[in-house]
Amino acid sequence: MQYFVQHETPIPLESVFLILAVNFPEFTYVIELA
């Protein structure tokens, strides 16, 4: 979570889901359900 704290500019929620999808393939089904 340090990445979000270090950057003052808020990261788009879409980017967060995209990063999760890339690093954690098991999270892809969560994005599909959302």
Image (cartoon, helix red, strand yellow):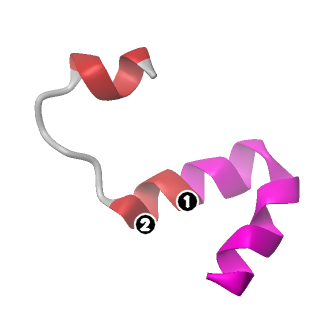
Callout 1 touching callout 2 (CB < 8 Å) = yes
Picture coordinates of residue 15, whole percent (x, y) = 43, 57
Q: Is residue 11 magenta?
A: no
The spot of residue 17 in percent (x, y) is 55, 59
Q: Quadrant of residue 9?
A: top left
Give the total number of marks visible in the rendering: 2
Please provide the residue range marked out in magenta. Answer: 18-34
Q: CA distance from mark 1 to mark 2?
A: 5 Å
Is 8 located above or below residue 26 in the figure?
Answer: above
Task: Tell me which amino acid carries mark 2.
Answer: Glu
**Residue under numbered circle 1:** 17
Q: In the image, which disc is placed on residue 14?
A: 2
Q: Is residue 24 left or right of residue 5?
A: right
- Residue in view at x 24 percent, y 16 percent: 6
- Residue 10 location in percent, x, y? 19, 45
Q: Is residue 22 left or right of residue 16?
A: right
Which residue is located at x 11 percent, y 29 percent? 8
User: Dot 2 surroundings within 10 Å: few (below 14), some, or many (20 or more)?
Assistant: few
| Image spot of residue 2 (x, y percent) | 40, 15
Q: Which secondary structure type mostly characterizes the magenta part of the structure? A: helix
- On screen, residue 24 versus residue 31, left or right, reads right
Quadrant the C terminus occupies: bottom right
Q: Which mark is residue 3?
A: none
Of the pair 23 and 13, the residue shown nearer to us: 13
Location of residue 7 with respect to 20 vertically, above or below? above
